[in-house]
Image: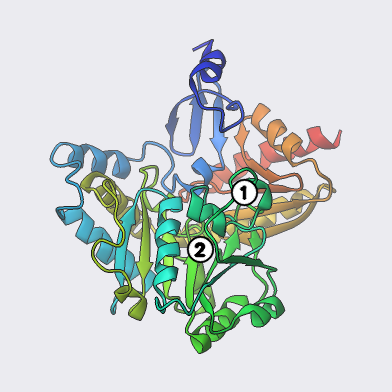
Amino acid sequence: MSDWKSRVDRDMMRTFNMPIAMLTRGEGCHVWDAEGNRYLDFLAGIAVNALGHAHPAFVGAITRQASTLAHVSNYFSSPPQLELAARLKRLAGADEGGRVYFANSGAEANEAAFKLARLNHGDGSRTRVLTLENSFHGRTFGALALTGKPALQEGFHPLPGGVEHIPTTIEALEAAIDDRVAALILEPIKGEAGVIDLPEGYLARARALTEAHGVLLIIDEIQTGAGRTGEWFAFQRDGIVPDAITVAKGIGGGMPIGALVTFGAASELFGPGQHGSTFGGNPLATATANAVLEEIERAGLVQNAAARGEQLRAVITAIGSPIVEEVRGHGLLIGIGLSAPVAAELSAAAFDRGLIINAPNATSIRIAPPLIIGDAEIDEFTSLFRAALDAVQA
């Protein structure tokens, strides 16, 4: 393993920077690298590993399903697929008239959402799709067009048209919505922007405006779903019902899977042949996601995310570092706003001390640990994070 960096440089497409380390195994909330160093994983594969690493429910589901039926294509259905569709509808509150389309990732789920938007009043009268500035919805072409980060779009124009990125204010939303808008697509918390909450009352106002103008309200729950924010889905905190949500990441606990879940009339927009995926909804992925969501529900991990999130925010604030300016987010999706552009240095200092966190930009730290964390993990985090802060301040 000693030459892994040269192998990465030789064999891997250069779409990412050089990896931080070569990880070889994980257990619970910890991972180990090729040199045997142990790390507390408070990023969870970017909000993916909801049950941590090598959880028995995750391992058992894959083992059982792989021994019977792994893949059948979309010409056939399977019991785990139908079970997961019903489960997602129930958890999202889409039982009445809801439908589910399965994909393989969050970006693919958002591609399906973009096509759903195009089908809203498909007579050509609605050409506009609104998303938010500084948002992130994926890197495939449609999802990239929805993403409100111009730097990520450089080199890839022309992108699919009709998308407008508006400021994240209620005033800008009120000015932009009209009867030519097909859909408003947004994140309830902007994860890649540094875990930035929407303004107070934004989702409720968005729902009222979209309903008044016949606009689809599509909520990207890829990073916020599956209990991460202390609710099954973040939109539920605001007491609204959207027209569709996209989900991925935590619902599979490490198994690649995504989905578009529709509510009410939006469920009738897609027809046969208008979208598809060879691997989407295959038995292996859906059986694993069923097991992950069942364990989250059985073990009360949504409630744990809410309680441990409050505990973590209190701990971070109590450290009293002059570098820490604010603590954002809900549940176990936490953003730490810094008073200086030292996020990369802080993330590196944390890693050197055995803690995995993330710097999505120069002044923000993102924390998204497994939903299974308890007092022991929070105590370990506190010690390691304080030491990293001290190192950066020195």
Is residue 226 at least partly visible in the picture? no
Is residue 347 at least partly visible in the picture? yes
Secondary element at tag 1: helix
The residue at 70%/76% (across/down) is: 172
Q: Where is mark 1, residue-wise?
A: 153
- Residue situated in front as seen by the camera: 12 or 287: 12
Number of marks in picture: 2
Question: Label 2 neighbourhood size at 10 Å, few (<14), some (14-19), many (20+)?
Answer: many
x%, y% of residue 179?
Answer: 54, 84
Examine the rendered structure and indicate whether residue 365 appears above or below residue 120.
above
User: Closer to us: mark 1 or mark 2?
Assistant: 1
Tell me the quarter of the image containing the C terminus: top right
- Residue situated in front as seen by the camera: 266 or 394: 266
Examine the rendered structure and indicate whether residue 114 appears above or below residue 172.
above
Amino acid type, callout 2: Gly
Question: Label 1 neighbourhood size at 10 Å, few (<14), some (14-19), many (20+)?
Answer: some
Say which quarter of the image contains residue 178: bottom right
* Residue 385 horizontal side relative to residue 184, left or right: right
x%, y% of residue 32?
Answer: 50, 25
Amino acid type, callout 1: Gln
